Image (spheres, rainbow, N blue to C red):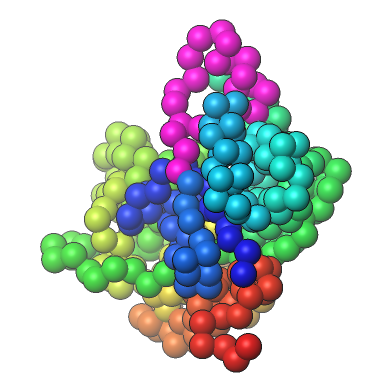
Amino acid sequence: MRRLLYVTPPLHAPGRGGREMLANLHWQCLLDLLGKHAAMHVLNPAPISGLVSTIAGLHGEIDGATMAAGQTLIERLEREGIARLFLNGSNLGHLAKMVKQALPMVEVLTFFHNVETRFFLGALRQRPTPRALAILAANRAAERKAVRFSNRLIMLNARDAADVRRLHGRAGTDLLPMALGEPRAAIAGPPPEESDYLLFVGGGFYANKAGVRWFVREVMPNISLSLCIVGRGLEPLRAEYDGNPRVRVIGAVDDLVPWYRHAIAVIAPIFDGSGMKTKVAEALMHGKAIVGTREAFEGYEEASGVLGPWCEDRDGFIRALHAIEATPPLPFDPARRALYDSRYSADAARRRLASILAVNTPGAKS
């Protein structure tokens, strides 16, 4: 069996946000599949500062994917005789270029958490600043190198594969949709102070903030349900809604389980972005109905009959939530949980990775 090196920025346990949670899950799946034939190589991202560093960043040397890091990586691949490289993110494309030019026989697989060019273009449109433009340019340069110098381009969904072709001239080669591991044991602590609220979960990304603000402004005045907003990076919204008794901004929490358990439904008013939304898989894992936009449900098309209402405008959300007020969904729907188990669980990710790597899953017959 060929050895594989998983290259990533530092990972924390548990992951800090959906991207890191997924990276941790992929690493565990690779360990399950390859055992001693899998190893991790951790990069050391440093802030970009100074003219030389800034110019390097604009050429795609970002998030620890520097010339020095690339040389260290090449030396390790040669020294340990490693034949496969798995890059945790298209932002590491500069490493794909360096490795492929030095060691053309090494197979490079790059996983795209988003189409970063598309994602940061959206961020620039939301807030057009010189810094946002520089971040877009740096990620575009890195991603173009990933597309050009990787053997396999592993995407979350078909739309991302098509976007990569449109933006960079080559489509994705494999699909590996969003997946989540089971949450760790619940942490003892006070439960939410109320129940039967709408729940929004997410990080402090531009599309989450814009979606929440739109929902509170356009939808909340027309429904009677309260809203809890949970997620790291959303704490700045507290000042905006301090005087609204039906909107609670919780921010970061140690344990999401009680917040899902006591919610009547999950909302996902997301109108821009790339990749797949973690909150949708989480809602399925907890057996919850989720009311969201087409963007929020991108990549979850096979779940369209199970998730909950798809809404594209103010009136659609209002109608869907009036229906939930009148006839509340099951607190835990086994059909939603079964869909998570079959398509978006760690087991599902392990099976898909086994197919991509052409190896047997643990326990399978040779």
Nearer-the-camera pick, 364 or 232 = 364
Most prominent secondary structure in the magenta stretch?
A: loop
Residue 241 coordinates in the image, percent (x, y) = 32, 40
- Residue 76 seen by the camera: yes
Residue 84 relative to residue 286: left or right: right
Q: In the displayed image of the protein, which residue is found farthest to the left?
A: 189
Nearer-the-camera pick, 22 or 9 = 9
Residue 95 coordinates in the image, percent (x, y) = 63, 37
Q: Is 226 included in the stretch rendered in magenta?
A: no
Identify the image quadrant of residue 96.
top right
Name the residue rendered at 81%, 53% in the picture.
171
Residue 316 relative to residue 44: left or right: right
Task: Tell me the quadrant of the picture where the C terminus can be found.
Answer: bottom right
Name the residue rendered at 69%, 64% in the picture.
175
Q: In the displayed image of the protein, which residue is found farthest to the bottom?
A: 365
Name the residue rendered at 86%, 43% in the picture.
169
Task: Tell me the quadrant of the picture where the N terminus can be found.
Answer: bottom right
Q: As displayed, is residue 171 above or below residue 32?
A: above
Q: Which residues are magenta?
A: 42-65
